Image: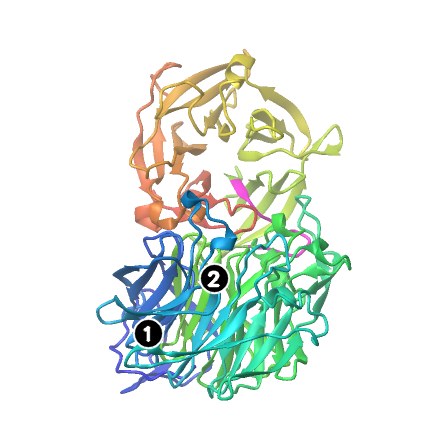
Amino acid sequence: MPRSWGSLRSLVLVGMSLSLGTLAYSQTGWTQTQPIKGFQHLTRYVVGGAVAEIIAASPDGNTLAFTNAGDQQVGFVDITDPADPKALGTVAVEGEPTSVAITPDGQVAIVALLDLIDDDKKETIADQKPGKLIFIDLSSRTIQAELPLPGIGPDSLAITPDGKKVVVAIEDEEDTDNLPGQRPGSITIVTLNSQDPAQSEVANLTIDLSQVAGANYPTDPQPEYVAISPDGKTAAVTLQENNAIALVDLAGEKIIRIFSAGTSQHAKADLTEDGEISLTQAFEGRREPDTIAFTPDGNYLVTLNEGDTDLESFGDNIWSGGRGWSIFDREGTVVYDSDSRAEEAAVLRGHYPEGRSENRGIEMEGGDVERFGNQDLAFVASERGSFLIVADITEPQEPRRLAFLPTGLAPEGILALPKRNLVLASNEGDGTIDIWQASPAEVDPYSEREPLVVSESLDLPFSALSGLQVDAQETSMLYAVPDSAIAPSRIYSINLEGNRAKVSKALILTKNNEPVAYDLEGITLAPQGGFWLVSEGDDREGQEKPNILIRVDDQGSVQEEIFLPESDAQKITRFGFEGVATNADGSKVYVAVQREFKDEEKGKVRIAEYDLTSQTWAYYFYPLDSGNVEDSWVGLSEIARQPDGSFLILERDNQGGVNGAANARIKRVYRISLEGVKPGETLDKTLVSDLLKDHNWLEEKAEGLTVTEKGFWVASDNDGGETYSRLLLVSP
């Protein structure tokens, strides 16, 4: 929507590579003089609360508001310097904030609030009360007024460019497992009383789907998301579960058209959750869009086709969700559909969540569309794959991808600020906000020390890197193994080529000439040839499997499986074997055990030693760090031998990721030596690197570690494609 802009101070941003001729400065802010070709990542800001879901910006682009449903708060951030955001505090609200927008005059943040069911009072969905709007004064950050809404479950809101009206999608998602619901949602139009918002006029529009072809639940419209045209005359509202879009005349306060979003058909999709990423199946899915946005000229609508019904709901073998994004004209004609392009890009970069294949794949959900100079840009994000695609849609029938940007976990809110040449993603999964700046150059943020991990082709998908090892002769070659998210098990070969780490091979493991599946967590070279691997055990009901030390040859054939003595095996929970290394001559193998044995002293874990000659196990004790947040744990992820015979240990807590980046405390590499230490004794450790403090390592699962002549590599396990695979070389 149009925004007024105050004077912005000069931006001097660390790490940027913009030429002086790129942007011209004027009294109204930065003016774009060259086409945008890329986006430079400035920071991943940790909000400090449980969730950062939907974001909005003040007209000058300096202040952000975000919803935090987990803590029932609305947070505020100063991004005057977008590379160094500053917290401005939070406002507590009574209910779940679902959406926020800031008025064009920059004075008020308007928040949609969902009434919460009180479990302690044994309330049910029938007891849920209507939602409301709250009005927060932006200067004092205090609640100034509340306005009751006529419906239950407000989900999204938008303000007209003139600031006179607010449109609210009231979903009333009363029972997602038993659709249709008994309480139909609606579209509410609020004509604001700027002097006394509590006295604003409220009009509620009933949605009639009886004549809409393809509507899934005609009696339960399920409004999801609101967008308003640049001229302020029309609102577009997605009716997600009904796979439809409603257009609303705001002056007349009436619905003027509802059309079906139709289906998206792909030649390439993965529809089977079998541990194998394979875009080889034909696919047709109801788009069921979530976010919607007008193009800057107001002639087209961009939809993010997340999906939100069950495959079995309609018995027609058409899937839920379009697994991409689309562009419609106002009559409902599809002028562009991304078909399988977004998922193909995700597979090549390891962002494809294989565990969602039988659901809705990458689930494109959040997005925005804005004009940067003479370019119309669409920003479309995958909630399940944690990435943002930027596309030039100046020609709506022929979009052109400009960038693929990894985000924090599960991006929900996307906000483009063209007058500041910024785009932001609020990441619900880990409570972070990513900020990028537009550039006329083709930005490549990767380096030899932090390369992009990418596959050479769709035939070599990769994910869940949980163990890492450098080749003995060629230090530009790494080997990695995935955990149980990928099956059958395999060993990836990764070639380091400048700022790229290219997956070039996947060696499938076999046992008795048949593919085999383990939960691999570590890999190291066997001095006698081949590899040592470790597979983590699991004692949960239905998941029972032992911890195993495995030797394979150069062809991936299992030569030997070694188990712990039964008395010790019974003491390990599912947090067992996590890393593996050998001594120099290969006569002994060392295994890092992630967490304490049952009924043993807390804060000490075992480094297990297997003697190949005597075929016996012995143990050393490793003291874990403390200082992690309450109700979290600390454990080991990897062990790697150094040239002098000592070992590096990767130690981490289980925070970050779904447990919130704000809670991460321990992501550290220590050095230990076994020299002069007897089995059963406790090891001394020396800090080598604090990954969190020194390298802003917010990712939960720092799991891969290998030593080279230049330092050591660390890799993150991306939880089966739910986020990106970070690879970092740390100098000693």
Image location of residue 686, percent across then percent down = 29, 32
Q: Which residue is mark 2?
A: 412
Please state which of the two labelled residues, at mark 2 or mark 1, is closer to the viewer.
Answer: 1
Q: Nearer the viewer, residue 722 or 142?
A: 142
| Point 43% across, 17% down: residue | 619
Image location of residue 38, percent across then percent down = 46, 72
Q: Which residues are magenta?
A: 454-466
**99 sits left or right of 234 in the view:** left
Q: Nearer the viewer, residue 721 or 523?
A: 721
Pointer 2: residues within 10 angstroms few (<14), some, or many (20+)? many
Q: Main secondary structure of the magenta part?
A: loop
Image location of residue 675, percent across then percent down = 35, 20
- In terms of image quadrants, where is residue 344? bottom right
Q: Are marks 2 and 1 in contact (CB under 8 Å)?
A: no
| Point 60% across, 81% down: residue | 396
**618 sits left or right of 80 in the view:** right
| Point 64% across, 47% down: residue | 505
**78 sits left or right of 593 in the view:** left
Q: Amino acid at mark 2?
A: Glu
Mark 2 secondary-structure assignment: strand
| Point 67% across, 46% down: residue | 273
User: Is 280 situated above or below 440?
Assistant: above
Q: Which residue is mark 1?
A: 198
